[in-house]
Image: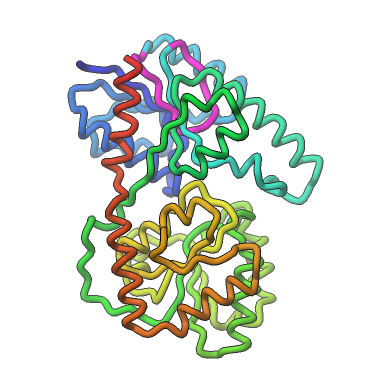
Amino acid sequence: MSINLLIDARAVQKNVDGISRFSLNVTKCIAKRRPDWKITALVGNDVAFHFESSEINTISNSSSRFSTHANKRLTDRINKISPDVFLNFSMAGPQPDAPSIITVHDLMVLNLPCYFGDSIIRNAFSRFLFRRALKASIGHASAIAVPTMATKLDVMRGFHSATDKVFITGEGQALFPSTVSSQLERQNFFLYVGNARGYKNIPRFLTAYGRLWALNKETPPLVMVVRKDRAYSYFLKHLESNPARSNIKVLTHISDDELRNLYLTCKALLIPSVYEGFGLPALEAMATGAPVMASKATALEEVVGETGVLIDPYSVIDIMRGMAELTAATPEDLRKMGESGRDRASIFSWEKTSACFLEQIEALV
């Protein structure tokens, strides 16, 4: 059975981020697994090159994913295309006549009080508008994709109409093959990969690192790969006042090859977020056998399981404890931790994620 599938991939950025990787890899896996389908992707004007190597048609549309007026106009355009199923990698967007699947990567916009900055009024108004848009999107959707049980529970608590629609997809990683074989030796540095927004917990993280370094100068240097976004200047303020500043190296725009090398050679990855929808850097690091320090009681715990060092992200002392454990660990302990993480990473893949979407798509036709 051939299906005419239209995908809203406007979330894909020119410089690929987490949601971009999700959207690109799921789309390409679906196209590979269903070569007889007609698959078309709505993409921004400057990102179609990401799809050039696949049998996917693209339609340029750079309208805002969260603009009510833009999405109403786009809905009319989608209805003229008349797809069998509309798959949206965003949680809000057009509401066409075709059966629709939306993707809720996380609900930190609603659950983190200062997501939109320090202004109480701005946060309250922005959350009101976003909740209203998401409620309409959830009410219209035929199915709702989420990456983890943590996100599923968030959606079900916040929107009771979603209860019977939500399905868990998991995520995958494409930086490394399922089995990583490398002649590179682990070096003595900690690694952080991510942005600097509030949910990443940068102030507590840097405070913990600075205090640990002050107590123990044998604490490994910290390499931070931080994307330059709206929170980057805020990150720099915390960084420059840190007592361990000389022990911290910051990288911004790096290639995938450079990122692979960092994962393959770091002593451990540190990801102390207070909130995550999944936590792709943890999975990428685990695939290489790098030990991971991650936050418990978040989606990260679903990804890392018992293979890493779990910490309370709200406690500077506990973040210090996690880094101190990794600093003091023997090479054999780190190797065993990394091997168990690599084994766990193998249960996640974009092929499994795309299979979850395919099951829902085919059930709607």
Q: Is residue 334 left or right of residue 162?
A: left
Which residue is rendered at x = 24% and y = 39% of the image? Answer: 53
Q: Is residue 182 left or right of residue 224?
A: left
- The residue segment tinted magenta is 83-97
- In percent of width and height, residue 7 lies at 38, 26
Secondary structure that dominates the magenta span:
loop
Which residue is rendered at x = 60% and y = 56% of the image? Answer: 274
- In percent of width and height, residue 208 lies at 62, 74
Q: Is residue 134 left or right of residue 171?
A: right
Q: Is residue 84 magenta?
A: yes
- The quadrant holding residue 82 is top left
- The quadrant holding residue 66 is top right
Q: Give the answer, above or below, for where 194 lies relative to 141.
A: below
Q: Is residue 20 visible?
A: yes
Quarter of the picture holding the C terminus: top left
**In the rendered view, how is the structure colored?**
rainbow
How many labels were placed on the picture? 0
- In percent of width and height, residue 70 lies at 57, 22
Q: In terms of depth relative to the viewer, which is nearer, 287 or 238? A: 287
Q: Give the answer, above or below, for where 311 lies relative to 198.
A: below
Q: In terms of depth relative to the viewer, which is nearer, 347 or 187? A: 347
Quarter of the picture holding the N terminus: top left
Q: Is residue 44 visible?
A: no
- The quadrant holding residue 261 is bottom left
Q: Is residue 255 magenta?
A: no
Which residue is rendered at x = 64% and y = 74% of the image? Answer: 317
Which residue is rendered at x = 38% and y = 43% of the image? Answer: 170
Q: In terms of depth relative to the viewer, which is nearer, 170 or 70? A: 170
- In percent of width and height, residue 214 lies at 63, 87
